[in-house]
Amino acid sequence: MKLSLLLTKRCNAQCAHCATDSGPYARRSLPTQKVFSIMNEAAQRRRAGESLMFGLSGGEAFLDLEQLVAVIAHGVGLGATVTCVTNAYWATSDAKAQSIVARVRAAGLTHLAASTSRYHQRFVPIERVKRALSTARAAGINTLLKIVYSAPEEQEGVVQRWADFVGADALQAFPVVPYLRQGGELPLEHYVRAPGLPKGRCPAAVLTIREDGAAFNCCTPGGFETLLKLGNVFDHSLDALVDRYHFDPTFQVLREQGPIHFARHAIKNGEEGRLRSAYADVCDLCAHIASDPVLTKLAQDSARTYRRRWAMRIAKTMRANATLITRKSTSQRLTKSRGIEHER
Amino acid sequence: MSDNSSRAQKKPQRQKSKPPKKTARSVKKAKSDTYAAIAKALDAATPEQLSALQSNLIKGENRVAGIPLSRFDAGYLAAQLVAYHKKPKPRHRPKIYMELFFPDDE
């Protein structure tokens, strides 16, 4: 089981593209005891042989190092793999980076990712990202560099330059999407988009719990909307949230068909004008549907119809199977009785 | 005489207790109603109820909303519900966790 925990909304940076609206003035954090109880519930749910993984992020989780170390140690104590994402603001010098990496490594952290982009670099220089990740690598931690890029940067080959400069074990690069912090705006030419509706199923479903306890089916920018909301850990048990994660009709559609199913339903209902003519990827399409109340309502209706058809398909198959079994047993009975007659 | 009268009294009682004759049409109708009720129950079930149904079927309690299922139907339905937990891998994209770091362990 994978569970992602966005521990805090507090962040030293205030990036234009931040989808969680984190910043220095945001104070909300998940209480440590609540984090522990969620982790305990997740560990209790784990079946034999199943791996358990906690992904920590924020805001900036390293701003409260004591909480972060305690959460990592608790997760590792439950037998889980614990990973963390940071903007690496804390790697101001080699000595500072080494002391912080030593603390999280001692707590049991095995995977560390650092994010950078032109938006991050207004607050955190890329040199700190390089220092944080190279120190972590030296301490035996797996590292990942996450880059958010705009269309001009893609054309200039900036992503590869940054990746070569930092030198992490792995690289994930994402185009910036228009789900920005409140009031944020980027020039249209910054968005990387391909014309048409992107096909493909949900590639990033993971139960994500935010700093206010809200649980979502998604961890990507624009995903923290009503359409993908499962409930709140302060009101529901983790079991109930996991049940919704698995059995809610909206997520069934996203897992089996992808957001294009909802887009097609919107087009059928004459709402084509609400969709864009180009998208970055499936996540962009999904987030766009989730950000529009009319498209959200249509998507929910479409998900209910999809569930009804699923139920009817199951009942129909059961009926067909039952008929087949009856025919088989009748023919077996007949063959048997004919055999007996033949023996006579 | 008395024997005849007692027979006459008993006769209508026997007729009443006799179950209605099963015709091919009535059997077909009953089957169709049963499967329609199963479809309705599955459609109306909340995620929590579907999860509970899955656990019950795995335990061997072969019923949906009180409707008994054959062992074959129960096995089929349980397999359909378990399939929900298996996230199909996307065909043309790797897993992406924008806000997180999950090394691909699946």
Image (spheres, coloured by chain):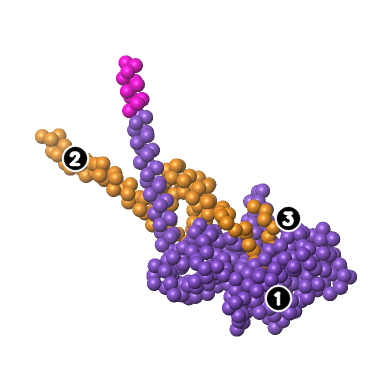
Chain colours: A purple, B orange
Magenta stretch, residue numbers:
A334-344
Find numbered disc 1 in the image and state the secondary structure of the residue it sits on: loop
Find numbered disc 2 in the image and state the secondary structure of the residue it sits on: helix
Sequence-earlier tag: 3 or 1: 3
Q: Is residue A286 visible?
A: yes
Give me the residue at 21% from left, 44% from top.
B16
Observer-side mark, 1 or 2, equals 1
Residues indicated by labels 1 and 2 sit on the same polypeptide chain = no
Q: Residues within 10 Å of mark 1 (few under 14, many from 20)?
A: some
Find numbered disc 3 in the image and state the secondary structure of the residue it sits on: loop
Pinpoint the chain carrying mark 1.
A
Where residue A281 sits, quadrant-wise, is bottom right
Look at the picture and state if B85 lies above or below A93: above
In this orientation, which residue lies closer to the viewer: A16 or A118?
A: A118
Pinpoint the chain carrying mark 3.
A
* Residue A296: percent from left, percent from top: 48, 71
Where residue A82 sits, quadrant-wise, is bottom right
- Judge from the rendering whether residue A31 lies leftward or rightward of residue B12; answer left or right: right
Magenta stretch holds residue A337:
yes
Q: Which mark is residue B74?
A: none
Magenta stretch holds residue A31:
no
Residue of label 1: A118
Give me the residue at 57% from left, 56% from top.
B92
Give me the residue at 68% from left, 63% from top.
A172
Give me the residue at 42% from left, 69% from top.
A267
Residue of label 2: B10
Q: Residues within 10 Å of mark 3 (few under 14, many from 20)?
A: few
Residue, far left: B1
